[in-house]
Amino acid sequence: MAGSRYSRYAGGPDPLAPPVDLAEALDAIGEDVMAGYSPERAMQEYLRRGTRDTQGLDDLARRVAQRRRELLDRHQLDGTIAEVKELLDTAVLEERKQLARDAMMDDDDRAFREMRLQNLPSSPAAAVTSLADYDWQSSEARAAYEQIKDLLGRELLDQRFAGMKQALEGATDEDRARVQEMLNDLNDLLEAHARGDDTDEQFADFMDKHGDFFPERPESVEELVDTLAQRAAAAQRMLNSMSPEQRQELMELSAQAFGSPALQEQLARLDANLQSARPGEDWDGGEQFRGDEGLGLGDGTGVLQDLADLDDLAEQLAQSHAGARMDDIDLDKLARQLGDDAAVSARTLAELERALRDSGYLSRSSDGQLRLSPKAMRQLGRALLKDVAQRLSGRQGARDLRRAGAAGERSGATRPWEYGDTEPWDVTRTVLNAVTRQAEHGGRSTSGPRIRIDDVEVQETEARTQAAVALLVDTSFSMAMDGRWVPMKRTALALHTLIRSRFRGDDLQLISFGRYAEVMEIEQLTALDAMWSKGTNLHHGLLLANRHFRKHPNAQPVLLIVTDGEPTAHLESDGQVWFSYPPHPVTIRRSVDELDNARRLGAQTTFFRLGEDPGLARFIDQMARRVDGRVVAPELDDLGAAVVGSYLGSRTGASASSARPSDFFGGGRGFWVG
């Protein structure tokens, strides 16, 4: 049997990777939107934080910055000069040994040579230049000196063509001549391209002749220029990063490359052509290296290219310019600098962003701004309602609130049966599900379809009594200041979702009351920024609630009030707002009168008191007693469960006198008052 080899999949994104979790993303984005962020900013913040299993943009940017610091802290740019000095010291030492051993040498000649070696300039470049015409007596010394010329030539080429230092190690004169020919042909090609000549044929001939010098295999002159210009610019930035003394040393040493200035002349011509072709590259920048590990010219240029890549990645990860998208991030560059895991994280974030934009959860309004779509609002509401159901049940894992109401009239809707359901089966849907399932799997039965438990659907019912529900939420500045803004919105969305999905016969009106009151759609309320104007105009809110109740004379009025402060504002007869703190007796009187009107309309009233202020507690307790209402003082996390529980209690006929904490909390936190 033939053996098999397995390796990491390298054909793009992992085909077995789990799909992105849009539910988690939408929950997080929705939370930020309710806290006052725009959907666009909320999505960007989520991508910055990342998911449970994926690094976010901030983590990736931190790794980029750390990698950049490591390169600067580890390296120094004197590697080539240090290597030249080491070879020079070796040559001088071997020459002195040979002079001491050579008994046949004339004493005057020996003394002259010793003096010349003794008085070499301290500068490695000047020393190499002064020994250019020296007649070496030691073959080892001559070989070391020739290595200096060879090293300089390979380093200069490695600056412009990555890998040349290693490729030309031990090169012959023929190899060096071939390099000179390639450089001359390359400069001719670039100059012809700059003049606007048709260089397609010239480029093809050049690649046929010198293609082995370019492993990137560019397919056009433009691609060739891009590749060379990026590295040449990095080489120039390396020179700019050196001290003036180091730069001068290298300039003088370059003339000794391969034993003649011809190479340096061709490279200078190449740099001029590339800078003219790509003036937009960074030819003037520089870095401050702080480490001890010396870098040669080629390796140093590579590090400068790495630093440029890291700068590009930092800008891409910042996503700071208008219209920035995750697709802007260069995944190949990210993998090269930080590893495959970073590229996988960035690719996952890009897929998540794309899925959020394409899923219909985010839509653009007429003014071009992103909004949470109705689909997103329903998804968020279902998630919040599930959390409320768990809190009401008092145990994790309890099934969702799926009842449409008390046993009564059928709504016409059906749903899959769940354990504990007592509604009647929808026989037609149940049998159809069984037949469809068997047909999809190619099954046949002579005795009719076999019904499984997951085929069963039950009929939803509507309660016989319709309710008109008014949820009044305090939007005064204290709600935002004390961290109650988001829990208030979550509560409204959970109740809205419950009524729209399970009690479709009921009519819910959301009313915000700060300095004045306003009827709001759920999308408007969830996107509402924190209100910092002073005033708690319960009077105006009750006016709007009673108007809602009067529009539904045959419905049971349900009044739910969420507040953290006493009334401090009311409407005057001319429609102007009167504000006073501490609360003015007139404001209290107007609020009490409207609450009495709600009682006369038959409203079942529940106050949800937030905060521990004793004055507020006394006031709300008195208001509740006046209208035979209820007072609930939940913790913030339980506010949604408290409001939904109170609504369900009113909806199923629980009276104020018979209600108990378990009716509304199911063992959750909070306490009962009144």
Image: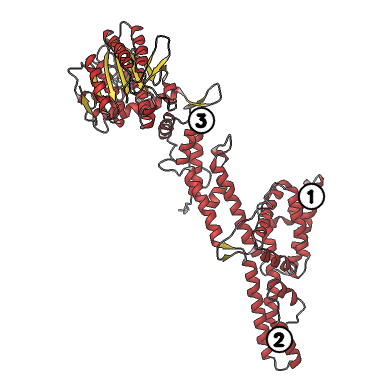
- Up-down relation of residue 456 to residue 82 (above or below): above
Residue named by callout 2: 114
- Up-down relation of residue 599 to residue 659 (above or below): above
Q: Which amino acid is tagged 1?
A: Gln
Q: Are marks 1 and 2 in contact (CB under 8 Å)?
A: no
- Up-down relation of residue 34 to residue 331 (above or below): above
Percent position of residue 547, x then y: 36, 9
Q: Nearer the viewer, residue 327 or 3?
A: 327
Q: Nearer the viewer, residue 176 or 21?
A: 21
Q: Quadrant of the C terminus?
A: top left
Q: Are marks 1 and 3 in contact (CB under 8 Å)?
A: no
Residue 673 in sight in this render: yes
Percent position of residue 377, x then y: 42, 24
Instruction: Tell me which numbered mark, 3 or 2, is placed earlier along the sequence.
Output: 2
Please give left or right for residue 182 compared with residue 64 in the image. Answer: right
Q: Which amino acid is tagged 2?
A: Glu
Please give left or right for residue 27 compared with residue 210 in the image. Answer: left
Question: Are there few (<14), some (14-19), or many (20+) residues within 10 Å of tag 2?
Answer: some
Residue named by callout 1: 202
Percent position of residue 91, x then y: 67, 79
Cα–Cα gap, marks 1 and 2: 55 Å
Instruction: Tell me which numbered mark, 1 or 2, is placed earlier along the sequence.
Output: 2
Please give left or right for residue 396 compared with residue 142 in the image. Answer: left
Q: Which amino acid is tagged 3?
A: Arg
Q: Quadrant of residue 36?
A: top left
Residue 435 in sight in this render: no
Question: Are there few (<14), some (14-19), or many (20+) residues within 10 Å of tag 3?
Answer: some
Instruction: Tell me which numbered mark, 1 or 3, is placed earlier along the sequence.
Output: 1
Which of label 1 and label 2 is nearer to you?
2
Cα–Cα gap, marks 1 and 3: 47 Å
Residue named by callout 3: 357
Instruction: Identify the colour scheme used.
Output: secondary structure
